[in-house]
Image (spheres, grey):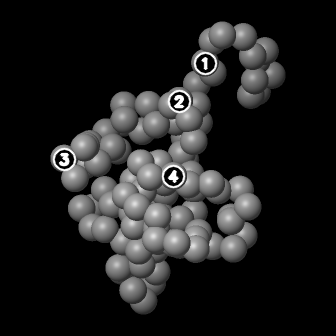
Amino acid sequence: GEEGQPAVPGQEAPVRVKLPRPGQFIGKVMQRLGGNRMDVKCTDGKSRNCRVPGRFKRSMWLRVNDIVLVEPWPDNNDKADVIFHYKGQGMQNQLRKRGFLDNLKDEF
C-alpha cells in the first residue's frame, strides 16, 4: 500500500484519482475512429475527436465506454489529446462519487 500501510487482501485501498486540471475534461469513449483516434463525449457536453499521443500509445488500450481524461488542443477546441485512462471500477467509482460523471450518464 501507499505510505507504508500494508495492503489488506480483499480490501480496496482508497484510490488516488487524477482529477481534471483547469482546461481538461473527463470524457467517455463513444467510438473508435481508427488509428489512435476516437470520438470522446466530454463532461462539458462537447464531443471531441481525440487522439492518444505517441508517448501514451503503448500504455493505453481504450475501448468504447472507457472513461478518460482529455486535454483539448490550444488552437482547436474540437480536438483533444487523451492524457489519462481511468482503468478499473475503483477509479470510476471515485469520479462518480465526486460527481464528475454526472454529465456522462447514458442518455447519449
Q: Are marks 1 and 2 in contact (CB under 8 Å)?
A: yes
Dot in front, 2 or 4: 4
- Can residue 25 be seen by looking at this rendering? no
How far apart in space, not on screen, are marks 1 and 4 (Cα)? 24 Å
Residue at the disc numbered 1: 12
Q: Amino acid at mark 2?
A: Gly
Q: Nearer the viewer, residue 44 or 28?
A: 28
Q: Amino acid at mark 4?
A: Arg
Q: Amino acid at mark 3?
A: Glu
Residue at the disc numbered 4: 63
Q: Residues within 10 Å of mark 2 (few under 14, many from 20)?
A: some
**Is residue 90 toward the left or the right of residue 26 in the image?**
right
- Which residue appears at 58% of the width and 25% of the height? 14
Dot in front, 2 or 3: 3
- Which residue appears at 63% of the width and 21% of the height? 13
Q: Residues within 10 Å of mark 1 (few under 14, many from 20)?
A: few
Q: Residues within 10 Å of mark 4 (few under 14, many from 20)?
A: few
Q: Secondary structure at mark 4?
A: loop
How far apart in space, not on screen, are marks 1 and 3 (Cα)? 30 Å
Residue at the disc numbered 2: 90
How far apart in space, not on screen, are marks 2 and 3 (Cα)? 23 Å
Q: Residue furthest front?
A: 34
Dot in front, 1 or 4: 4
